[in-house]
């Protein structure tokens, strides 16, 4: 990754890689890299192993005592390599700024433009002869690449082709992804990324992201320093224990942070060099992986308890020491038992956000607020039933309760009573309270025990059914029909990922919920109000569910009508949410920021979307949506006194847009 030097400018240290170092699009700029001046060049001029010796010495010698007992750290978060603390007999790293050129430039994905290098650039950057003579613009490259991707019928092959492009030419990768977002999101993200994680060992070519395993205990800051970029703004970290609804994939979960961060850039405009995907490897309990010779992670069972929390604590401390207070750490796909504890432990000391608890909650609340325009009533008028009481289920439930309580001024405990959860043992009720995990306890309401979902639907009579169970096909025909017999327009959200784990398909949701005659609608209302039982005759014609799912489903044509399912995926929220935090220099995540993001997203659903039954806007406009979310989140952060970037910009939407990375090629001088 570190480039060879043709010309160097000594004495500059700590600049942040490929970001806004100099020049905008019209001013030409050089393909700058920060590198260190002890190069051992290989035959191609690439710098090899430049850091090893000096860094080890720095750690041993330059850092003697430290404010917070961490034996590895230097003179503070900015003194990345301990230069400030070093005395004359200590080794320091001779940082410099260099310009990538020639063969190295072509192989640097941050700066490579392939055949789009102009004649002038080919002369100025020693590229003559290294490329065929033709020059083609980025637009043509995008057209060629999309055709290339479409040649593959198998989604995993498309995924591999996309990853290959990302490793070869980053700007082309992002241009392609942004220009064809609806088509390519299911490839680089859910659901295909799930399959990629399952087969990560088989398809592994080049390492992506940073791996921190138990082997690195006591040396995590050193590992962070090995990452070539210094100016990190967002980290997505997983320990691979609950990858989507696919369970423990250990170290192979790396596909998730990589995919999420591609979306941070493509959808939220955070520049790629500021994004760092990390996988913490504490082993895996997945027997298949443990017995697989191609498994890329530690072949041992998961560390738990103190060993686990010590490693995580070292990681959290090292991140803050290395990148400062304002780096956003997004926890992703941790198992329930760690996810809640980590969020609780670090939410007051770090800028942390759990995507599966908070991001999913924010996106679903937005969908529900939008759905109310179609079904009527306020949140307080509705009754919610969840299948699945883990991170997503309880996270969504809590955010709904919070918003309802704000709207009605009713105490949180009171509004929670409209929200019911079913887990593997049946309805969560007060008689089970003692044996429940702490995050389920607030949902243990007074009710007789109910063993299964169908009975729970019939007893609770919810208006909204939400699946967060990770169990494919758990919304059976009987369950969906029961929802349809209770509600004119049942809201059914089947959120588990990937597609194979979805509680029901879009087609099932629409075909199992049929239009009923007006007389029957009256009868339903009568039944709801007066509680008497009525026999209802259904006139089967069209689906009437308001449906959204976590993984994408194609539109469904049913009896001449096209139904377009929405995708209730946290991808709508986290890129804009993160951008809002970063651009305002926010230092802590507050629940009100999640509510602000929800509100911003719900506002983006247009009349035209509603007409199609959509409760989320299409992804085609996602960058505009993200700017809007970022602005609302930042505005709330300023209001709460959590934003440190002062003064507050006047027009936050414009400011968000101006902060966003665009993948158009830059001209090199
Ligand atoms: O990655 C996704 O598509 C949504 C998500 O966070 C999960 O299912 O864990
Ligand atoms: Mg997740």
Image: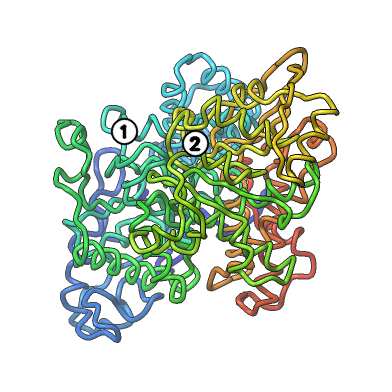
When the figure is inspected, residue 606 is found, relative to residue 71, above or below; the finding is above
Instruction: Check disc 1: other Cα within 10 Å, few if <14, some if 14-19, many if 20+.
Output: many
Tell me the quarter of the picture where residue 600 sits: bottom right
Query: Image point 26% across, 73% down: which residue?
Result: 92
Q: How many marks?
A: 2
Colour setting:
rainbow
Report x, y in % for residue 251.
27, 44
Label 2 residue near ligand 1, CB within 8 Å: yes
641 left or right of 33?
A: right
Query: Image point 71% across, 55% down: which residue?
Result: 379
Report x, y in % for residue 12.
43, 69
413 left or right of 18?
A: right
When the figure is inspected, residue 95 is found, relative to residue 544, above or below; the finding is below
**SS for dot 2:** loop
Query: Image point 48% across, 14% down: which residue?
Result: 153
Query: Image point 46% across, 33% down: which residue?
Result: 498
Q: Earlier in the sequence, mark 1 or mark 2?
A: 2
**SS for dot 1:** helix
Label 1 residue near ligand 1, CB within 8 Å: no
Closer to us: 10 or 608: 608
Instruction: Check disc 2: other Cα within 10 Å, few if <14, some if 14-19, many if 20+.
Output: many
Report x, y in % for residue 97.
43, 60
Report x, y in % for residue 533.
69, 36
Closer to us: 590 or 234: 590
Say which residue label 2 marks.
Answer: 189
Say which residue label 1 marks.
Answer: 200
Closer to us: 408 or 648: 408
Q: Is residue 29 visible?
A: yes
18 left or right of 539?
A: left
Q: Is residue 128 visible?
A: no
Tell me the quarter of the picture where residue 135 sits: top right
Closer to us: 481 or 552: 481
């Amino acid at each position: 990754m570190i480039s060879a030097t043709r010309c160097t400018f000594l004495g500059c240290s700590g600049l942040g890689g490929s970001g806004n170092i100099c020049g905008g699009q019209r001013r030409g700029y050089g393909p700058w890299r920060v590198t260190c001046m002890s190069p051992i060049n290989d035959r191609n001029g690439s710098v090899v192993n430049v850091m090893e010796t000096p860094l080890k010495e720095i750690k041993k010698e330059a850092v003697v005592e430290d404010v917070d007992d961490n034996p590895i750290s230097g003179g503070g978060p900015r003194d990345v390599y301990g230069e400030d603390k070093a005395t004359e007999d200590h080794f320091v790293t001779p940082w410099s700024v260099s310009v990538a050129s020639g063969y190295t430039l072509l192989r640097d994905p941050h700066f490579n433009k392939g055949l789009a290098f102009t004649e002038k650039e080919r002369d100025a950057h020693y590229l003559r002869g290294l490329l065929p003579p033709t020059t083609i613009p980025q637009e043509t490259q995008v057209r060629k690449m999309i055709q290339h991707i479409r040649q593959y019928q198998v989604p995993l092959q498309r995924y591999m082709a996309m990853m290959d492009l990302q490793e070869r030419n980053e700007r082309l990768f992002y241009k392609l992804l942004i220009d064809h977002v609806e088509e390519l999101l299911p490839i680089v993200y859910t659901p295909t990324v799930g399959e990629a994680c399952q087969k990560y060992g088989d398809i592994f070519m080049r390492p992506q992201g940073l791996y921190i395993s138990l082997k690195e205990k006591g040396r995590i800051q050193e590992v962070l320093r090995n990452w070539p970029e210094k100016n990190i703004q967002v980290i997505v970290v997983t320990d691979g224990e609950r990858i989507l609804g696919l369970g423990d994939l250990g170290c192979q979960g790396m596909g998730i942070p990589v995919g999420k961060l591609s979306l941070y850039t493509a959808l939220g405009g955070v520049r790629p060099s500021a994004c760092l995907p990390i996988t913490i490897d504490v082993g895996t309990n997945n027997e298949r992986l443990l017995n697989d010779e191609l498994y890329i992670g530690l072949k041992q069972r998961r560390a738990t308890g103190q060993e686990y929390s010590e490693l995580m604590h070292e990681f959290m401390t090292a991140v803050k020491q290395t990148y400062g207070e304002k780096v956003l750490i997004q926890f992703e796909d941790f198992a329930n038992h760690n996810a809640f504890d980590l969020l609780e432990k670090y939410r007051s000391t770090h800028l942390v956000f759990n995507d599966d608890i908070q991001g999913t909650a924010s996106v679903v609340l937005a969908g529900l607020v939008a759905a109310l325009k179609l079904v009527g009533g306020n949140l307080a008028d509705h009754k919610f039933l969840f299948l699945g009481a883990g991170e997503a289920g309880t996270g969504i439930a809590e955010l709904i309760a919070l918003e309802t309580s704000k709207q009605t001024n009713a105490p949180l405990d009171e509004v929670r009573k409209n929200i019911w959860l079913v887990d593997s043992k049946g309805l969560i009720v007060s008689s089970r309270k003692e044996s429940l995990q702490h995050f389920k306890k607030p949902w243990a309401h007074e009710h007789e025990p109910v063993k299964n979902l169908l009975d729970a639907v019939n007893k609770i009579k919810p208006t909204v059914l939400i699946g967060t169970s990770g169990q494919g096909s758990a919304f059976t025909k009987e369950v969906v029909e029961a929802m349809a017999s209770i509600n004119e327009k049942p809201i059914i959200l089947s959120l588990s990922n990937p597609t194979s784990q979805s509680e029901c398909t879009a087609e099932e949701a629409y075909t199992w919920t049929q239009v009923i005659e007006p007389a029957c609608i009256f009868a339903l209302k009568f039944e709801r109000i007066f509680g008497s039982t009525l026999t209802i005759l259904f006139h089967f014609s069209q689906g009437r569910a308001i449906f959204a799912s976590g993984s994408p489903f194609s539109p469904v044509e049913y009896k001449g009508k096209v139904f377009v399912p929405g995708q209730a995926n946290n991808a709508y929220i986290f890129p804009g949410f993160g951008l809002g935090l970063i651009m305002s220099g926010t230092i802590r995540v507050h629940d009100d920021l999640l509510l602000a993001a929800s509100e911003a997203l719900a506002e983006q659903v247009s009349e035209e979307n509603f007409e199609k039954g959509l409760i989320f806007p299409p992804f085609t406009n996602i960058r505009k949506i993200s700017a809007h979310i970022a602005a609302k989140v930042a505005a709330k952060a300023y209001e709460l006194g959590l934003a440190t970037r002062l003064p507050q910009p006047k027009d936050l939407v414009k400011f968000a847009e101006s902060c966003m990375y665009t993948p158009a090629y830059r001209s090199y001088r």
